[in-house]
Image (cartoon, grey):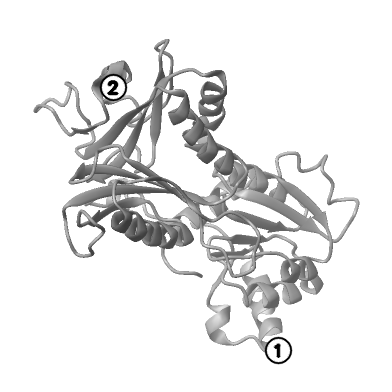
Amino acid sequence: MRDILPDLRARCSDGVPFALATVVAVHGSAPRGPGAVLAVDAAGAVVGSVSGGCVEGDVYEVAREVLAGAGPRVVSYGISDDEAFGVGLTCGGTIEILVRAYATAAERVDLAAVLDLIAADLPVAEATVLSGAAETGARLVVRPALAPGTPGTPGTLGTLGSEGLDAAVTDDARGLLAQGHTGIQWYGAHGQRRMQEVAVFVRTYAPPPRMLVFGAIDHAAATARIGSFLGYRVTVCDARPAFATRERFPVADEVVCAWPHAYLEATEVDARTVICVLTHDPKFDVPLLAAALRTPAAYIGVMGSRRTHRDRLARLRAAGVDEAHLARLASPVGLDLGARTPEETAVSIAAEIIQHRWGGTGRPLGELSGAIHHRGGPTGTR
């Protein structure tokens, strides 16, 4: 959704009717995962993608029918024939796609409220009925629960058709939102657990994960660029005013001039945050890493040679850091790609972050068998 967010917001504000196709389930290998979207407006313009081109033509026709009043539909695509050249996926998997229209002003106003929250990096979940006793396309928007006394609007918008179903889906959507997960949930007609009467697709929109890059060197500039490309909110931090400048890091969301450990101790770090330490200096590294290892960060990568790493470990042990915490360090940082330049090194770091997140092997796909795309959620912290 984020990749076509400006286009969708423009259509809502301009009063342009459109249909939205959303991938709701993937079985086997497929180019795009659940949550990928494609929009078709009343003039026939298309933005987004649900399959990288395999089934877009047919989805376009379905979207036009839905926009003309056919009602929400869930369509499935797999391999259509032995040659896989018909309407279907050439990669061997199956995808299910929900197509629904935002034809009226009221529908677009409701969607615009969600798009505004996403644009503001505020967490929100959207639940949509796919099949069963409830009406296909019924929609419920869920905000996170607020702590007692906290100002704001948690609440919900819309309904799935029954109070019990709304309550059950609201609870589950908030749990999925906290985890950053998206997927199909099953319920009874009135929200009963362990029943398979109603399929509900819950799409969560959490704020982008953070990438904290410490050390304002040339490798940091390349790492910030690839971090931004991967969808992270990137912060570059260095204690030297001459180096920590916006001019040197134009793509970073934030450039901070502060002692790295002091900044880290004062900023928010969660289980999706990745930390890249590129400082190369013990007076920065040791207090920074001691602080980083106390956080729930998903990944802590540290640049330096093997000799530097051994010296760093000795200093951290002397500072009281135990072996279990030291084992979380990815050092020397990155996968073995033979990288030489800062840009190549940034690719190596990004590859290790992706590998750790999804549990990949880091080996060439041609040497492996089985599924190409890992379908599990993120692995644990490192």
Compared with 118, 315 (above or below) is below
Q: Which mark is residue 295?
A: none
- Direction from residue 366 to residue 133 in the image, left or right: left
Question: At 10% from the left edge and 26% from the top edge, which residue is drawn?
Answer: 81
Residue behind mark 2: 66
The location of residue 41, given as percent across then percent down, is 42, 17
Question: At 55% from the left edge and 28% from the top edge, which residue is drawn?
Answer: 9
Taking the image as drawn, is residue 111 in sight? yes
- In the image, 153 versus 364, the foreground residue is 153
- In the image, 84 versus 307, the foreground residue is 84
Question: At 19% from the left edge and 23% from the top edge, which residue is drawn?
Answer: 87
Residue behind mark 1: 318
The amino acid type, in three-letter code, at marker 1 is: Ala
Q: How many discs mark residues in the rendered view?
A: 2
The amino acid type, in three-letter code, at marker 2 is: Val
Mark in front: 2 vs 1: 2
The location of residue 150, given as percent across then percent down, is 64, 64
Question: At 23% from the left edge and 49% from the top edge, which residue is drawn?
Answer: 199
The location of residue 273, given as percent across then percent down, is 58, 60
- Direction from residue 133 to residue 97 in the image, left or right: right
How far, Cα to Cα, is label 2 from label 1? 66 Å
Q: Secondary structure at mark 1?
A: helix
Q: Secondary structure at mark 2?
A: helix
- Direction from residue 145 to residue 58 in the image, left or right: left
- In the image, 379 versus 69, the foreground residue is 69
